[in-house]
Amino acid sequence: MIGKTLGGRYFLEQLIGSGGMADVYRAKDNLLGRTVAVKVLHPQFAKDSVFIERFRQEAQAAANLNQPNIVNVYDWGNEDDTYFIVMEYVEGRDLKRIINEGGAILPERAVEIAIAITHALEAAHSHGIVHRDIKPQNIILTVDNTIKVMDFGIARQTGSSAMTQTGTILGTAQYISPEQAQGYTADPRSDLYSLGIVLYEMLTGKAPFDGDSPVAIAYKHVREDPLPPSMINPDVSPELEAVIMKALAKNPENRYQNAPELRADLERLLEGAPVAATPVLRPGERAAQETRAFEIPSGAPQKKRRGLLWTIVILLILLGIGAAIYALVNGTKGIVVPNLVGQTEQQAKETLEEKGLELSVVKRVIDIQKPSGVIISQDPTAGEKIQKGERVEVVVSKGTEQATVPDCRGLSQSEAAARLESAGLRIGNVTYDYNQTIAKDKVCSQNPEPGAKAAKGSEVDLVISKGPEMSMVPSVVGLDMETAKSKIEEAGFTAEIKEVTSETEREGTVIEQQPAANERAPKGSKVVISVVKKAEKVPVPNVMGMDRNTAVSTLTSAGFEVTVADKQVSNQSDVGKVLDMSPGAGTLANKGDRITIYVGVASSV
């Protein structure tokens, strides 16, 4: 897609993000001349009317939100079954990356970030929009420290259809609210629960619930209490912990009921005032006072729940009986298949031969993760039992497909993107630097270098020229030569000395400079300074009677400047010869002085 123009105006320059539903590109709006972000729906969803409807709703819903902490949406459209949304381009890092790279955030800063998010949620909720996917990955800290909430990819109008396929729960498991995990309708309090999870992660460096699968994590949201954050980070005060645990109440009725209510408690924290949330009781204390099990919302049929529970119990019993019978019949038969993944083909063959089994390579595929000849997968899997002499089928890596890195130097970024894409590569990090020889906005260097081999699909980092770095030329007229040179070099220029003679100025003094003082010039360029040298008087050579060229050569060799003037003569033998000179021959003059010679030319009379 890089290098393509959508909607006749949005030129896609670089892939900057990818999610389950769409890719996000940095792009140039050719109509308004600004940088934007363009979110492009994955091709596999382009013919799915449900996903298209979600995509359209995202654009329309978010376009109505105008709040400093929300990423603006400008436009949306489709072109040749490519659906896209045009958004504000935000430079910065997402909160997940910040936590991963730096660990837990200081409590006061975490509270400030959470307050900014409540402003964004209040604006959305006031328009009847529930975000439904609040998580650190969707929170951007810009280069000027503004907090921006982005990606209304699963936002929807309150009361509208859930926009899910049967059995599918939208949202990210670690941040999903208990009611969403159970398939119930999300409301603004669901976003506040997710914000509570984000605040917990900012303070501890990790989400409160984790597991081997999304289902396992969702179960914990519904049935388990989080470990109080102060037990992980002692810097979390009891008041801040109370706010977090109130936001994380299983029952929505026990949470903050709206964003302003949560923000009010967070602001009290910063002011050192008492918070409305009640102090957190430890598990032993709480057990005697309350049960925190999630209550199914009113209207949910209890009979249906009891029937579902009985069905699960019966299935578990039947599965257990079946497993036990299988173990009794087959537990002592067959050979346990070893784990071959990660082994070379030869190693795997030897491993299987020792056990009386055979290796069968069913496919060789390109894999950028595994070196050539290494096994990627196997069937049967490790731990299963098969009979002696049977085959274990494996898929073997062919390694990475190599591409030759093209030369992008001297190209614009969009031209470089197109050239890399045609080679099976893509743009990586783009940085900007001054360059004295490469024009502004052109690539001045790249890594890997042109002609190098790289895995197809890998990235090539580019450095874009900012043009020559300009600087102010210092004033050096009147200074001595060494001081002037030093001042010029300190300003980032080089000094070129031009010696001149003067009857009035002191020897070694700068009497002229080019460029002039206070002009802007490229750093590293030359500043020519005219420095007075001691006048050296020498006798003017006698060139009388010489031909013109010989006379000029003689005088310049002696260090003089020469001016030639015509003198009309009637005698043909005087034509082309020096007939007079000023100053006269033998006169003492300074080297560099100008001597005028008069050369005979035929009279026109």
Image (cartoon, rainbow, N blue to C red):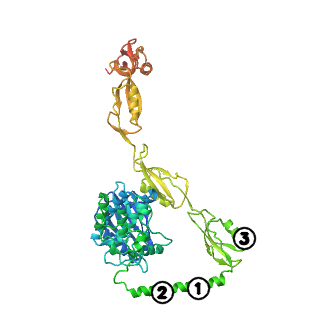
Q: Quadrant of the C terminus?
A: top left
Query: Which of the 4 quarters of the picture holds residue 239?
Result: bottom left
Up-down: is 514 above or below 541? below
Front residue of this view, candidates 378 and 526: 378
Which residue occupies 34% across, 84% down? 299
Front residue of this view, candidates 68 and 319: 319
Q: Are marks 1 and 3 in contact (CB under 8 Å)?
A: no
Earlier along the polypeptide chain: callout 3 or callout 2? 2
Q: Residues within 10 Å of mark 3 (few under 14, many from 20)?
A: few
Which residue occupies 58% across, 85% down? 322
Which residue occupies 40% across, 34% down? 490
Left or right: where does residue 313 sit relative to residue 540? Answer: right
Up-down: is 15 above or below 211? above
What residue sits right under mark 3 in the picture? Answer: 354
Q: Are marks 2 and 1 in contact (CB under 8 Å)?
A: no
Q: Quadrant of the N terminus?
A: bottom left
Query: Which of the 4 quarters of the picture holds residue 307?
Result: bottom left
Q: Nearer the viewer, mark 1 or mark 3?
A: 1
Residue type highlighted by circle 2: Thr
What residue sits right under mark 2 in the picture? Answer: 311
Q: Secondary structure beneath disc 3? A: helix
Query: Which of the 4 quarters of the picture holds residue 121?
Result: bottom left
Residue 460 visible in the shown view: yes
Left or right: where does residue 157 sit relative to residue 437? Answer: left
Res 322 label: 1
Q: Residues within 10 Å of mark 2 (few under 14, many from 20)?
A: few
Q: Residues within 10 Å of mark 1 (few under 14, many from 20)?
A: few
Earlier along the polypeptide chain: callout 1 or callout 3? 1
Find residue 546 and report its horizontal and vertical position in percent. Answer: 43, 17
Q: CA distance from mark 2 to mark 1?
A: 17 Å
